[in-house]
Amino acid sequence: MPSLVQQLSAHRQFTALRTVVQCKAKATALREGPAVSDGPGAAWVAFLCPAHSKGLPEWPAAQTHAAQDSMPCGTVLDFRPAEQLLRSHADLWLTTLTGVRPETYGGVWSDVLDQADRVLRERLEPGVDADEDGPLPGFLTMLWLARRSAAEDDLMQAVTALGYCETISKDLLPRPDADLAPQ
Ligand SMILES: [Zn+2]
């Protein structure tokens, strides 16, 4: 009998492996994302612990199952194509972090990522309050890889690099009480 993940994947390859929560707990729930429009299977599946299984509004699930595998909480297997994955990264953290909106650049992802890089580098300028020992330099290295791949029209490779950026972004996103958001 195929496992639940095998059923939900409908024998597709996943296109991205993401870590959307930093949590050391084991997942107990498997959240099944909405069905894809052009075939069988879910758009994504997310593994979450009890504390996180109810509190991720940005990952609206079609159904929740008991997790059969002992995956770390926050693991997401994503089955969407590159354009949708890039859009998801923008919606979930890139625009929040940088203020850069894909529609401003006509959905040209190399331009979107270049502008995001510009915004973040300004935070590393002398006199700007940025922690150079913090996660931002490593983030910018991965963003550079994503920019280069996007410029070469290799959007899947850009998605892979952005997956690392997404994980690191948890340490960069402004806290509710901090005014770090760019204008
Ligand atoms: Zn958790």
Image: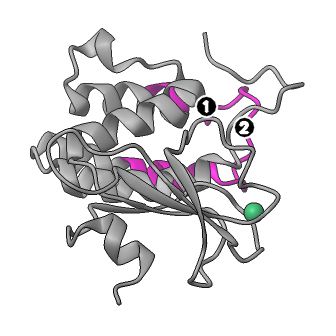
Q: Range of the magenta residues?
A: 118-143
Mark earlier in primary sequence (2, 1) = 1
Say which residue label 2 marks.
Answer: 130
| Above or below, 104 relative to 176 | above
> To which residue does mark 1 refer?
125
Task: Report the quarter where the N terminus lies.
Answer: bottom left
Q: Nearer the viewer, residue 31 or 84?
A: 31
In this rendering, position of residue 38 left or right of residue 89: left
Q: Residue furthest front?
A: 1
Q: Are marks 2 and 1 in contact (CB under 8 Å)?
A: yes
Does residue 169 appear to the left or right of 18 in the view shown?
Answer: right
Image coordinates of residue 168 in percent, x first then y, are 60, 54
Q: Is residue 138 magenta?
A: yes
Residue drawn 67% across the image and 48% down it: 170
Element at badge 1? loop
Quadrant observed for ligand 1 in the rendered image: bottom right
Closer to the eye: label 2 or 1: 2
Three-letter amino acid code at the position of disc 2: Ala
Mark 1: amino acid: Glu
Residue at 56% across / 84% down in the picture?
69
